[in-house]
Image (tube, helix red, strand yellow):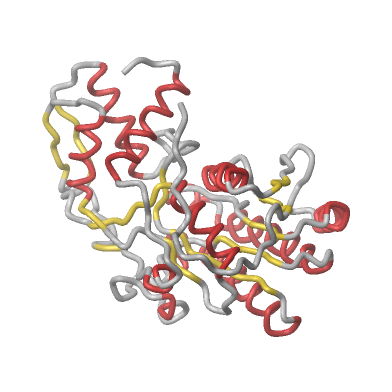
Amino acid sequence: MTTDLPGPPQESVPSLLRPGARVFVAGHRGLVGSALVRRLAADGYEVITRGRDRLDLCDAVRTGAFLRETRPDAVVLAAAKVGGIMANSTYPVQFIEDNLRIQLSVIAGAHAAGVERLLFLGSSCIYPKLAPQPIPESALLTGPLEPTNEAYALAKIAGIVQTQSYRRQYGASYISAMPTNLYGPGDNFDLATSHVLPALIRRFHEARQSDAPAVTLWGSGSPRREFLHVDDLAAACVLLLERYDGDAPVNVGSGKDLTIRELASVIANVTCYQGRVDWDTAKPDGTPRKLLDVSRLSSLGFEPQIPLRDGVARTYAWWLEQQGAQV
């Protein structure tokens, strides 16, 4: 399957990255990293990658040596230990320690190697559990975090502060971005560990395949969530590398949300499931709303290019290809 990548913004602004710059993407095999590789290559940049079998990013000595040897013009830190609520609750030590090690190795190693530009990717979970909606970047560190992913969130907050510290102490051109809920090619469709959008795609697909009369989903369907196709995220990341050089983190999202009930309807339509959708209201809904304020990113000229239904259809087609299945 071929996917057209979102085009760059129209305004002509001098870039902070020279044409053909060499960019190391840490975590290139993941959902975000693979999209970044596609985007950077399409925009004419030289992409550098190393698999975990050849470079353990938790190893500061080896990571520093690799960066000194390759001397990229820029680094995008998309590598992280990630997981759902169960994994975060069960293994908080690994979520905080592994992510801190990766961040310390890559960011400090990049500075020691003289890397001029670095983009650190965090997560919207860095914000307080009861942050105002839409969530502005200024909400960071203004209230308690969601307890179930506190260890992961604290590691990501440390990464933001680390990039800011290198800016303030050494004048390094290092920046950070906080993506919203992402989906797209390369997503995780394991029902035990996946996030809501890929999980719903699989649930409705399997229900259609088995002619199930109904699909039962957790909660009331009323919580509102924001989603961004990972190729739009990649376009935003390249834009930030080219145009943004500020101390503050930048939210990356669509600026729009919808209810889980509405999301289920979109996915049922894409997967051609015509049965009934039941809602188990005895199960928890979670946070009522989680939407990012994307005005800072929008001021740079960014607008998402992939509508939700189109993005879901592309993601579904990609997953079917991986399964060797037929629509």
In the displayed structure, 112 sits above or below 228; it is below
Left or right: 49 in relation to 243: right
Instruction: Name the residue at the bottom extreme.
Output: 168
Point out the image quarter for the C terminus. Answer: top left
Q: Residue at x 43, y 29 (%)?
A: 318
Q: Residue at x 76, y 81 (%)?
A: 170
Up/down of 8 relative to 130, above or below: above
Question: Residue most toward the front?
Answer: 12
Quarter-of-image position of residue 51: top right
Question: How many dots with numbers?
Answer: 0
Q: Residue 175's spot in the image, x, y percent?
A: 60, 70
Snapshot quadrant of residue 129: bottom left
- x, y percent for residue 32: 53, 47
Image side of residue 183 versus residue 312, left or right: right
Q: What residue is rendered at 46% in x and 36% in y? A: 185
User: Residue 323, image x and y in percent?
Assistant: 44, 20
Foreground residue, 93 or 41? 41
Work out whether residue 34 or residue 245 is closer to the camera in this orientation and state it. 245
Residue 155 image point, x, y percent? 59, 65
Left of 50 or right of it: where is 269?
left
The residue at 35%/66% (across/down) is 292
Q: Using residue 278 as the reference point, say whether residue 69 is left or right of it.
A: right
